[in-house]
Image: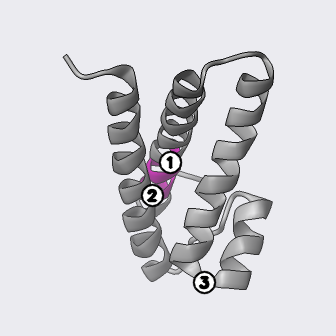
Amino acid sequence: MPSRLAAALALLAVGVAADVASTYVAIGGGQYVEGSPVGGAFIAAFGLVPGMLLTKAAGMVVIGIPVAVAGGTRRLVATLMCAGVGLLSLATAARNVLLLLGLWP
């Protein structure tokens, strides 16, 4: 059975890949709008993929700092950072797909 950290890393990889791929497709459809002001600023400053990766890193910091301050172990902090950003990335990818299908306002 894989460890929770390994599962979280897999979730992060799948989420980021789905987010990047669905964003490329959504941009091609001409209806894409970045939902995050931080993401929008990073993408405008650094380009699409680097901006998206910086946004993911910022999300990891936002998730990880409170857990670390609360006394979480390094392994717990890493697991929650990866799983949290992976889940948010999957949610963003789902939003992009709904946008492409015309089911998102």
Residue type at tag 1: Ser
Which SS class for mark 1?
helix
Task: Tell me, for residue 47, which label it has, or none.
Answer: 3
Residue 74, percent from left and from top: 58, 27
Residue under the point 49% across and 33% down: 83
Residue 16, percent from left and from top: 43, 54
Task: Tell me, for residue 39, which label it has, or none.
Answer: none
Q: Name the residue under label 1.
A: 89
Question: Which quarter of the picture shows residue 52?
Answer: bottom right
Q: Which label's residue is closer to the chain start, 2 or 1?
A: 2
- What residue range appears in magenta? 91-98
Quadrant location of the N terminus in the rendered image: top left
Residue under the point 60% across and 83% down: 47
Proximity of marks 2 and 1: CB atoms separated by less than 8 Å: yes
Residue 88, percent from left and from top: 55, 41
Which SS class for mark 2?
helix
Task: Tell me, for residue 19, which label it has, or none.
Answer: 2
Instruction: Determine crowd level at label 2: few under 14, some 14-19, many 20+ residues with C-alpha closer than 10 A.
Output: many
